[in-house]
Amino acid sequence: MQRNINISEEEAAKQLEFARILKESLDERKAAENREFTYHIETFGCQMNAKDSEKLAGILETIGYKETDSENADIVLYNTCTVRENANNRVYGRIGFLGKLKKKKPDMKIILCGCMMQEAHVVEKIKQSYRFVDIIFGTHNIYKLAELLYESENPVNGSSGMCIEILPDADKIVENLPSARKYSFKGGVNIMYGCNNFCSYCIVPYVRGRERSRRSEDILNEIREMTANGVSEIMLLGQNVNSYGKGLEEEISFAGLLEKVCRLEGVKRVRFMTPHPKDLTDDIISVIAKEPNICNHVHLPLQSGSSRLLKLMNRHYTKEDYLALTERIKSAIPDVALTTDIIVGFPGETEEDFQETLDVIKKVRFSSAFTFIYSKRTGTPAAKMPDQVPEDIIKDRFDRLLKVISEISAELTAKDTGNIVNVLVEEPSTQKEGYVTGRLANNLLVHFEGGKELLGSYTDVRLKEAKGFYYLGERV
Ligand code: SAH
Ligand code: SF4
Ligand code: F3S
């Protein structure tokens, strides 16, 4: 059942007022100490968190903090992920390290937010063992950073404890907050928040709350503002983008939204992440096929190729459904690149189940795949399932899986060598000095000679040499 979500523009005004007050006192401190004040945000997890971090950075920059790479900043903020257990362990290690920094620099503020903080046992552990942390909040109130900073700097009744605010679920979508984007030429736009799918292994629905879509006009306005500022590639973001539109007053589907977005002036490339196979309808496929600036790349998480496991995972499709769907996508969009997510070692996974996964991979021929070892998440149904798979068997399957995936990737990239493709130049190359990295429409990367002046531009490149998951190329 859809709850009423209050769409709030007043909340943004309230938060900007807190930011204004904080700016006044920060300006005084800057003048008194004659220096800049800095922030550092460390983002763990997915695109949703990356986007949230841009919003958090937007608030801190409005207050007057400058970004720094160093964790020796005046404000250090960790935006956490809890999708797998090892993500959590990494964060605890980092918080311990921050504690040592803070001993040398007592005025430093340490802020923790994001998915991990939505779990009560995590907050309890931080309260017990990491008492130097200043502010903790979750995923549903990131818009409140300015207010929480204000409370932390102006404690009621002189108390100086941790400032903690975790909401169990979201009650509003806050529009019109500032955002400091990582790239000037491409950016993510949330189209929906939360997830209602409850895949049996996954903690995301518990930490991100129920699914709620943004009004299409709010999404389009945000994109108009982005293109006016030079952004040309838009990534539509949501845990299950193709169920977009449910519960809105307007009649709109994901296909309808895609069509509107790709026709906006200044939008050269549109991507989206992540569609769920059960909701990828033919009208979405035909919009991608028909519209030239929707990238011919579909990331379509498979998770497992075994229909038996897919049922236990609560995925609502079978191996045959998935294969038929990818066939429909390929025949409608001939040069499409398909990528996926796969979990190895889901409870009860047998060698036969694993062979089914390999079989799907060989039939679909993904250009790349994210592979994950199953991680038991307390509170999810799979955590209570019998027959957790032993570690050595998982490790063996994982290695075999990677081998098959990389062989197919290498064959696919080799096949396209020699082609001339249009790329968006994104970054100085990490592979070679004097080189830049461009992204193909199919999401693969090519490294070629070029300077920083090319960043953010589109250029034609010949793919000279396939290197497995990427290419070396030259501008033509
Ligand atoms: N909403 C997206 C992304 C969810 S998280 C989707 O449905 O695809 C990204 C990936 O993490 C998932 O696709 C899944 O492959 C993996 N994942 C989620 N929970 C996991 C767990 N408990 N153990 C291992 N991998 C997991
Ligand atoms: Fe998790 Fe499934 Fe929702 Fe993706 S669709 S976020 S895997 S519950
Ligand atoms: Fe992690 Fe939260 Fe994303 S758990 S994968 S950061 S939604």
Image (tube, helix red, strand yellow):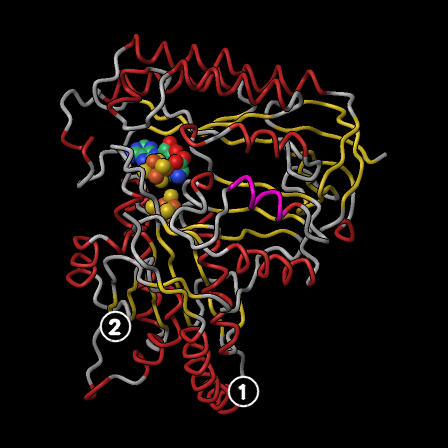
Amino acid on which the number 2 mark rests in the picture: Cys
Q: Which residue is mark 1?
A: 34
Dominant secondary structure (helix, strand or loop) of the stretch shown in magenta: helix
- In the displayed structure, 428 sits above or below 14; it is above
Of marks 1 and 2, the one in the foreground: 2
The magenta-colored residue range is 254-261
Q: Nearer the viewer, residue 114 or 25?
A: 114
Q: Which percent across, then down, holds residue 13? A: 45, 78
Q: Secondary structure under badge 2?
A: strand
Q: Which residue is mark 2?
A: 163
Q: Nearer the viewer, residue 133 or 303?
A: 303
Q: Which percent across, then down, holds residue 456? A: 72, 51
Q: Magenta includes 409? A: no
Q: Nearer the viewer, residue 378 or 238?
A: 238
Give the CA distance from mark 1 to mark 2: 29 Å
Q: Secondary structure under badge 1?
A: loop
Residue at horizontal 56 percent and vertical 43 percent from the top: 256
191 left or right of 165?
right
- In the displayed structure, 395 sits above or below 48; it is above
Amino acid on which the number 1 mark rests in the picture: Asn
- In the displayed structure, 171 sits above or below 286; it is below
Q: Which percent across, then down, holds residue 336? A: 62, 25
